Image (tube, coloured by chain):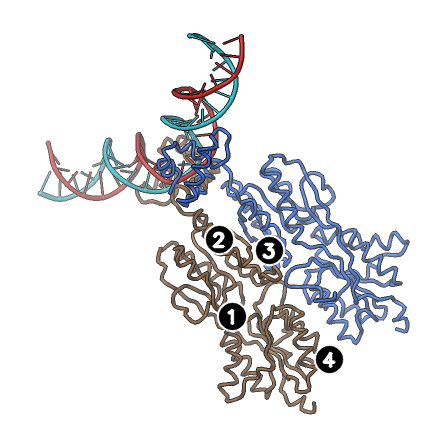
Chain colours: A blue, B brown, C cyan, D red
Amino acid sequence: MTLKDLAKLLQLSPTTVSRALNGYTEVSEATRLRVAEAAKTHGYQPNVQARKLATGRAMAIGHVIPLSQTHEMVNPTFTDMLSGAGEIYAAQGYDILMAMVPEADQEATYRSMVRKRTVDGFIVHGAQVDDRRIDLLRELGLPFVVHGRAGENTDAYSWVDADHYRGFRRATEHLLALGHRCIALVNGVETMDFAHRRRQGFEAAFIMQGLPVPHQYMTSGEMTEHQGYDAAAEMLSWADRPTAIVTSSLISAMGARRAIEEAGEVMGKTISVITFDDEIGFLKNGYKTPMFSAMQSPVRVAGRRAAQMLIDQIETRDFAPRRVLLEPVLLLGPSCGPVALHDQN
Amino acid sequence: MTLKDLAKLLQLSPTTVSRALNGYTEVSEATRLRVAEAAKTHGYQPNVQARKLATGRAMAIGHVIPLSQTHEMVNPTFTDMLSGAGEIYAAQGYDILMAMVPEADQEATYRSMVRKRTVDGFIVHGAQVDDRRIDLLRELGLPFVVHGRAGENTDAYSWVDADHYRGFRRATEHLLALGHRCIALVNGVETMDFAHRRRQGFEAAFIMQGLPVPHQYMTSGEMTEHQGYDAAAEMLSWADRPTAIVTSSLISAMGARRAIEEAGEVMGKTISVITFDDEIGFLKNGYKTPMFSAMQSPVRVAGRRAAQMLIDQIETRDFAPRRVLLEPVLLLGPSCGPVALHDQN
DNA sequence: GACGATATCCAAAGCGGTTTGAACCTATGA
DNA sequence: TCATAGGTTCAAACCGCTTTGGATATCGTC
């Protein structure tokens, strides 16, 4: 059942039928209804490829996911980000065109998607402090929204990001207020923009109170269980070990907790832990009550916001930069306590 | 730069240029080279929409990811599965069209993708024991490959799956050989086909040795850290507690380990743990040495196999069912030991 | 009654490829 | 020498939709 068939059936021209179905005004209400009804009863479904060819629009959004070169690993937050975005796309008739490619092939992937006209815009994942993709995409001309930011100049493109700086500053201030001074940071890889901002927030908390930044307690790496474990185990073996740990993901926090327990310490009593929590589906911070004190910022929400922002740009053709900064919620759980308790150490 | 432009430039007809680029034989080698060169230097890239319209092929594979109705959560293995498949797609010029939709909307999503001709085939994720999607897809007529299987009748469709039954049987036999008799199973949701098979494997190990199946130690649920923790914590509080635990995912195993340590037990000494490990990127079973004894079956490999299988079917138009059963590797780590040590309990 | 405005509809020309059917050469064999 | 076959190339139709630029009918207005 093509448009032509339907038109013939209705004794109308394809033009009119097309217009009737697409809500143009130059069609009488009567025929519009007639067409709509016929379309429904005959199960007419426009051929998407043909429409794309005619309109030049792809009705699809490109998501190019970087694979970390070292371990071909995908950041687990990506799934939830995408499912958030997917809700919006589904509602507005856009498809998700996905590619998971190593860093090195990214530029080629973007270029090819643009040349092939296979998407109307991009969501950029895994923004680095110094991210060449921003310039590339500006050059390519399609609208895009960055999940995260890339370095200092954040005016020239659209983005949706959590306020990692404030989150980590506030978390650190919270620990300082509890009397902690030896606070460790188990951060993500700091070429990633979000990790860079988190580190700055962590440092700012000390600086603003005139305290020295505890560089000796600051580490960074891929956010795995083992990273948290190794970092915590190492530092807990020191004579001047930290009394509190700030981690960058729930999964590192779980590793840190393991090291803490193995060292015979008690989380929340002798060692405090606070973590960032993206609230991804299969890794909950506790079940009924929270397991860790945490800065929460649901990545699913970021996905929704980014998707809507991009679609708005595509449909209005207004590519002026837009921004959304999401404030993490500071959730107090049982994993933090005052420093006083472990004085005797 | 369209085909027509290129043809004019070369003083050839669009027909010839098209044929030259697509490897038809009715073109002399000389002109083929000339065309190829011109295409490259002028950066000609065929318009995908136009080609799709003309050929009727979409050059895209549909991945419809089910969101668990309860928590809108996505199985974390999916990312790695997809990145495995992505390698194959990229090499063969296929795109990934993705949709994450709640159970309830799945049928509609499949139907719409088929009607809109937007994909050439499907990969089915998250197969259930009783999965209506199989019949639906057979009815829809596009080729598809199931990641996993759906119940007993596995002849009528193509699939790629790990041998969950054998994996769990062998793991359980291993524990039995170590003298364990009170063995717990912390399984996934058993409406999922893989979880169902795992349970059967677990039971078979007992049955084959004439031992009673320890139903009181068998639980199932969403495979989260908390699931592992809760199940282990609960059972360890019993008088006749288990001496070993088989878990369905690394993440549940981590929860179980937490409960074990909190209970003052020592994993691998007083309580043994063995787990299934999909080898997903960000959740490694240990770093240099394994953390858990495990049945390993990399989901990334399953992704590659499934993708290749599907593409073969699409390109040969031979939809006869094909199957790949992947044998899990049994990896012995420090989390398992003989039962003798905890006799005094 | 003529005219412009408005509402409604349509033929035909794209969009950018693929594919069918035929034409044109050139070499081969009778 | 001519028919035949094989190797190359092309014009034109087609895929199914959108959109441009009228055409036609209706209506109010002067």
User: N-terminal of the two: label 2 or label 1?
Assistant: 2
Q: CA distance from mark 2 to mark 1?
A: 25 Å
Residues marked 1 and 4, same chain: yes
Q: Residues within 10 Å of mark 3 (few under 14, many from 20)?
A: many
Q: Residue at x 46, y 60 (%)?
A: B133
User: N-terminal of the two: label 1 or label 4?
Assistant: 1
Which residue is identified by label 1? B194
Q: Chain under label 3?
A: A
Rendered view: B276 above or below A140: below
Q: CA distance from mark 1 to mark 4?
A: 30 Å
Q: CA distance from mark 3 to mark 2?
A: 32 Å
Image quadrant in which you'd find residue B222: bottom right
Image quadrant in which you'd find residue C19: top left
Q: Residues within 10 Å of mark 1 (few under 14, many from 20)?
A: many
Q: Residues within 10 Å of mark 4 (few under 14, many from 20)?
A: few
Under tag 2, what secondary structure? helix
Whether residue B35 is visible to the viewer of this picture, yes or no, is no
Image quadrant in which you'd find residue B35: top left
Looking at the rendered structure, the kind of residue marked 4 is: Ala
Quadrant showing the N terminus of chain A: top left
Which residue is identified by label 3? A67
Q: Is residue B135 left or right of residue B98?
A: left
Closer to the eye: label 1 or 3: 1
Which residue is identified by label 4? B263
Return the x and y of residue A204 as percentages of the image width and height: 83, 52
Q: Chain under label 2?
A: B
User: N-terminal of the two: label 4 or label 2?
Assistant: 2
Residues marked 4 and 2, same chain: yes
